[in-house]
Image (cartoon, rainbow, N blue to C red):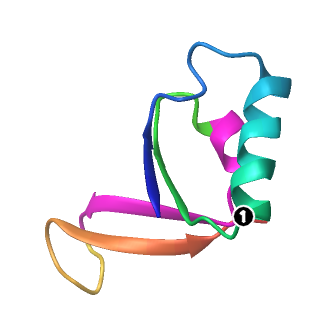
Amino acid sequence: MVFLDEVTASVSPQAAAELYAALHAAAVTCVSVGQDCEHLRGLHTHHLRLGVAGSQAGEGGWELCALP
């Protein structure tokens, strides 16, 4: 498992796609943090939302959603 913080901020979309493809091919679970959410969604299968009001976990809860 790797935690990637703003990893797509300084590279081209192609370079980011190649990096994530290599990690997925090596069966590495990626947890990404970043501001370019649309680009990151294309590189992942799920979206973890933290601090979600009204979730089953209550105020400050979380949701794990499958991405299309």
Where does the magenta region start and end? 38-53
Type of amino acid at the residue the image marks with label 1: Ala
Residue 10 drawn above or below residue 41: above
What x and y, as percent, mark residue 49? 39, 60
Task: State which quarter of the image contains the C terminus.
Answer: bottom right
Residue annotated with mark 1: 26
Closer-to-camera residue (29/33)? 29
Mark count:
1
Q: Residue at x 82, y 37 (%)?
A: 18
What x and y, as percent, mark residue 26? 72, 64
Query: Is 46 covered by the magenta stretch?
Result: yes
Residue 67 drawn above or below residue 7: below
What x and y, as percent, mark residue 60? 15, 65
Q: Residue at x 56, y 66 (%)?
A: 29
What x and y, as percent, mark residue 57? 21, 83
In the image: residue 62, left or right of residue 66? left
Closer-to-camera residue (31/19)? 19
Query: Is 2 covered by the magenta stretch?
Result: no
Closer-to-camera residue (26/49)? 26
For numbered disc 1, what is the local secondary structure? loop
Residue 4 shows up from this direction: yes
Q: Residue at x 68, y 48 (%)?
A: 41
